[in-house]
Amino acid sequence: MTDIRDRVRCRALHGKIVSAAEAAAAIKPGMNIGASGFTPAGYPKAVPLALAEQIKKENFKINLWTGASVGKELDGALAEAGGIQKRLPYQTNDALRKLINNGSIQYVDLHLSHVAQMSRYGYLGGKVDVAIVEACAITEEGHIVPTTSLGNSASFVQSADIVIVEVNTSQPLELEGMHDVYVPADPPRRQPIPIVKVDDRIGTPYIPAGPDKITYIVPCDLPDAVRPLAPIDDDARAMSAHLSEFFMNEIKHDRLPKNLLPLQSGVGSVANAVMAGMAESPYENLTVYTEVIQDGMLDLFDAGKLDFASGTSLTPSPDGLKRLYANIKEYRNKILLRPQEIANSPEMARRLGIIAMNTAIEIDIFGHVNSTHIMGTKMMNGIGGSGDFARNGYLSIFFTNSVAKGGAISSIVPMCSHVDHTEHDADIFISERGVADVRGLSPKERARVIIDKCAHPDYQPMLHDYLERAEKATGHAHTPHLLDEVLSWHIRFMQTGTMKAK
Amino acid sequence: MTDIRDRVRCRALHGKIVSAAEAAAAIKPGMNIGASGFTPAGYPKAVPLALAEQIKKENFKINLWTGASVGKELDGALAEAGGIQKRLPYQTNDALRKLINNGSIQYVDLHLSHVAQMSRYGYLGGKVDVAIVEACAITEEGHIVPTTSLGNSASFVQSADIVIVEVNTSQPLELEGMHDVYVPADPPRRQPIPIVKVDDRIGTPYIPAGPDKITYIVPCDLPDAVRPLAPIDDDARAMSAHLSEFFMNEIKHDRLPKNLLPLQSGVGSVANAVMAGMAESPYENLTVYTEVIQDGMLDLFDAGKLDFASGTSLTPSPDGLKRLYANIKEYRNKILLRPQEIANSPEMARRLGIIAMNTAIEIDIFGHVNSTHIMGTKMMNGIGGSGDFARNGYLSIFFTNSVAKGGAISSIVPMCSHVDHTEHDADIFISERGVADVRGLSPKERARVIIDKCAHPDYQPMLHDYLERAEKATGHAHTPHLLDEVLSWHIRFMQTGTMKAK
């Protein structure tokens, strides 16, 4: 067992240091487990692995609530052990996804800003029974210093009967001081969130706990299972260039200040590429108010373009993680991690005027967005924080490649096979082909801009043809559709392997 | 011309009193007109009627922006004159609806909380050229005292080059003091909205203007064209009873305080019936934070159940209006009208913990909601404020009758033909049959609850059959659907006049 007594600075808690298996034994069938973690960052590892072993022996299930997706030692191990009954609010794990899509696991896909308050309100099937939180240290007073993410940890600790803290010695102690922990009171006693600038501190640098609140402390030395990002390709570079040009035009027309407004960027390779591309842009003194701080933002810091980044998770690639830890004393002055309830808060998105930048699986000609489902039925990951930001930001931008699967799928379709963001929530669509600015347009006006600016030339004639026939058949109704044809592209893909007509 | 000099208390402005036709002559082709009005309450009447005459003579079009729907003297007269190019953000007028659905008018259906800031940001095709605002008086300093609604008036006045004030002598002077006008600064200078209780006052009782800002003053004595509400029927009574029982259970389980939380209620007969039904409930010391104050809320005041109501519009029925005006000195201490940017603010909905209650045209088995489109193509009214409240409230409740058109249409369908609120935004569905509580449920769990609790018995077997076949065909995917059958109920209705299978 790694010696973690140096990191448990509250001596009264040394007696609560136990093995992962001993702590996991406190978890009983049907319990609601609230874990730290947001992307493969800051999630518990030792206790979940021990829990998976226990589940394999005793054959039972628990409900798993987290910040967002987590690493393989949590989602993967528990899914493979058959130990998850219900999972929320977001995931990206292959084993778990398979079980979600074969009816074995009940998955509840929630706006990430909603989770903490829903759990406190008692909406998710009881309250949190056990909180498992990764920490880099425990303070003299018994408070918990989180690691690379904050997620819903503070709220889960507040609500839980049993609190298990995994002190992870692979996480640098320099993370201490990078967190700003604030859990709002619940209505009718809730007050305004007192943030007016991205770097405002409003809470504590630790999760309030105290020696009585903590049940077990478990040592762990497994690092975050961060993953490499896809190399930045020509399409991503084109989208980034389109974005930069769009911003330039907004500034020219006095719709944005010269240093823009706080940027939010979704998770993944396209989002990362877009942020990285900003390093070559003319913009200075940028700020970020987002969920996840990825490599692209480190690039912006290193290029001297970015003044401050507020998020709920630090999730660089393996190379980025090395870079982060090598210069953590510099980065830590410019980065703050907040609970996702605050990072993704609609109140903050609207007040700060966040520029929301998220990726879509598919969009339709009238501006609806599918962020979650493949061919309308299979869950990919989840809506994540895209809705929190897209609905409430100053600008709501969605990125998508014009085609997928080597051109067999058009990402611009007559009607989305699942809608996560409605026509009321998107301002700008960007594909590698161009920028569709649909602000202030009616559905029929939007359709022509989206087809002409974002769709692939292989599909443009088919989309125009659909629109024209739908207009004629409906007498130019507000949203012209041919209901018997509207999902035929998806059906054709499933039957023939391509959305292209013969 | 009615003598309005008593009501124009700023003597310097007496010289700007002109006829409606003289003021309307300032409006040129292609201009963006920002008008007061939210429901048939507080909208300008004389100038629009004069503008319609001018348009008939000179044959041109303008773009019309309002708070929400407005009365026939504005929407009806301009639509019938063929004078509207673009209309936003909400409407309920028959003549206008017809032109929206035949391609003659471009209609932009927006979240009502978004409109004012979008117009200030310059997202709607330029800024407001002319503001036309109904007033009951002009103060000594030249500020505008609004009438029965506030809507977007303050923001429109702030942005407009030309400001026309219609002083309406049919509106009682006792309305003065019922408004709380606050226009937030735009990012990056926006501050928290400093409201923590429904009755907090944060602004001025008038729209700031001053003698230089006002271009013309026009007298008017046409009353608001308020409309009678449908009589409360058995279905509405049943929904109201279900709601009351649901609240009781929430209180029992400590998920709601005994006086509930601030209530928001949509517009129309069902919403009104639900509120009126609360007068017979055991709940006391209720509060309301909503858009529109209808008869049902006057009933609650009269029953001593309601402490305070904050809204953006006062829209009783003709009988209710008489009741309101007869007792206005009492009601005015318990009612506040705010800009819709504040009334519908996501910041406020989430902080206050609003109970959002809205009506749906149709819902699907997985919990998506269509609030706007008939059979997926024809615009009915618009999304209004339902999204502002449903996304951000403490509880998001949608009401729908289980069937429409005498049973020929099931309001619960396999897939909505248009999605305005996604599965991520609804907690509770109530039909006359019962209450479906879908909090914390996966799509497949939700489907069974919605079918069993809310669907009409005539359609329950068909819905179960669809769900089971979809589960089998997709291997129990996260959201099981048969894409080639998913909209077949709508198609069947259009072909045969009923959704029922032969």
Image: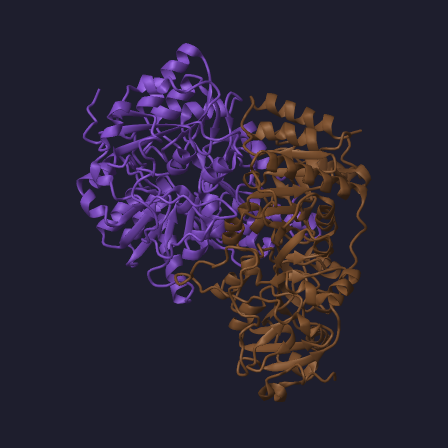
Chain colours: A purple, B brown
Residue at x 66%, y 79% (from the top left corner): B24
Observer-nearest of B498 and B282 = B282
Q: Is residue B34 above or below residue A69?
A: below
| Residue A23 in the figure: left or right of residue B477 | left
Total number of numbered labels?
A: 0
Observer-nearest of A204 and A257 = A204
Q: Is residue B225 above or below residue A243?
A: below
Can I make out residue A435 in this image? Answer: no
Residue A209 drawn at (x, y percent): 34, 35
Q: Is residue A10 above or below residue A438?
A: above
Residue A460 drawn at (x, y percent): 52, 47
Residue at x 61%, y 65% (from the top left corner): B150
Residue at x 26%, y 24% (from the top left corner): A219
Residue A319 drawn at (x, y percent): 23, 36
The quadrant of the picture occupied by the C terminus of chain B is top right
The quadrant of the picture occupied by the N terminus of chain B is bottom right
Can I make out residue B262 in this image? Answer: yes
| Residue B151 in the figure: left or right of residue A17 | right
When asked about the image quadrant of residue A66, the answer is top left
Residue B212 drawn at (x, y percent): 53, 83
When asked about the image quadrant of residue B376, the answer is top right
